[in-house]
């Protein structure tokens, strides 16, 4: 079809779940129009992106774009890492896991 573009819409409604939908849209369609065509609710502007980069809903799409809908984080990644490290203990994580015999602590 002349004057049309194909885009892929991807979202993860829950953990380990991925929904994909391929759409053919008229050239010059915006991100918001693609979400409406897919029947997915339009989230806030901070919750959607193209190829991993957040963009506003009024951005025009190009052929081959991958539109991604993001879920809000439930836990701050830095806090999660700190808690994981605390559960594992210093001896079983990271650099401290495999020390050479006779090496100084932390090396």
Image: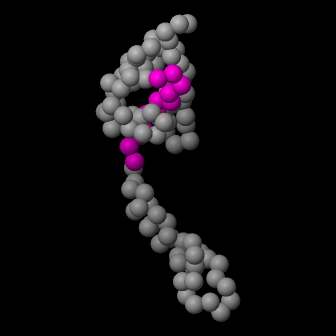
- Residue 35 visible in rendering: no
Q: Main secondary structure of the magenta part?
A: loop
Q: Give, as a single range, the part of the protein colored magenta.
A: 62-73
In this figure, what is the number of numbered marks? 0
Q: Residue furthest right?
A: 101
Q: Decide: is 5 above or below 94.
A: above
| Quarter of the rendering containing residue 26 | top left
Viewer-side residue, 3 vs 75: 3
Residue 5: percent from left, percent from top: 51, 16
**Which quadrant: the N terminus?**
top right
Residue 84: percent from left, percent from top: 49, 66
Is residue 105 located in the magenta-colored stretch of the structure?
Answer: no
Q: How is the image coloured?
A: one colour
Viewer-side residue, 73 vs 5: 5
Q: Decide: is 86 above or below 11.
A: below
x 64%, y 82%: residue: 99
Residue 101: percent from left, percent from top: 68, 89
Residue 71: percent from left, percent from top: 41, 40
Q: Decide: is 81 above or below 39.
A: below
**Which quadrant: the C terminus?**
bottom right
x 40%, y 54%: residue: 75
Is residue 71 located in the magenta-colored stretch of the structure?
Answer: yes
x 36%, y 34%: residue: 55
Viewer-side residue, 88 vs 94: 94
x 46%, y 19%: residue: 38
- Residue 19 visible in rendering: yes
Q: Residue furthest bottom?
A: 102
Q: Decide: is 76 above or below 46.
A: below
């Amino acid at each position: 079809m002349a004057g049309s573009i194909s885009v892929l819409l991807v979202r993860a409604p829950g953990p380990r779940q991925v929904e994909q939908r391929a759409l053919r849209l008229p050239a010059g369609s915006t991100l918001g129009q693609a979400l409406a065509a897919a029947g997915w609710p339009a989230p806030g502007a901070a919750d959607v992106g193209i190829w991993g980069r957040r963009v506003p809903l009024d951005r025009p799409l190009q052929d081959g774009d991958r539109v991604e809908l993001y879920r809000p984080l439930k836990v701050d990644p830095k806090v999660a890492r700190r808690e994981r490290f605390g559960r594992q203990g210093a001896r079983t994580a990271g650099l401290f896991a495999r020390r050479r015999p006779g090496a100084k602590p932390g090396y």
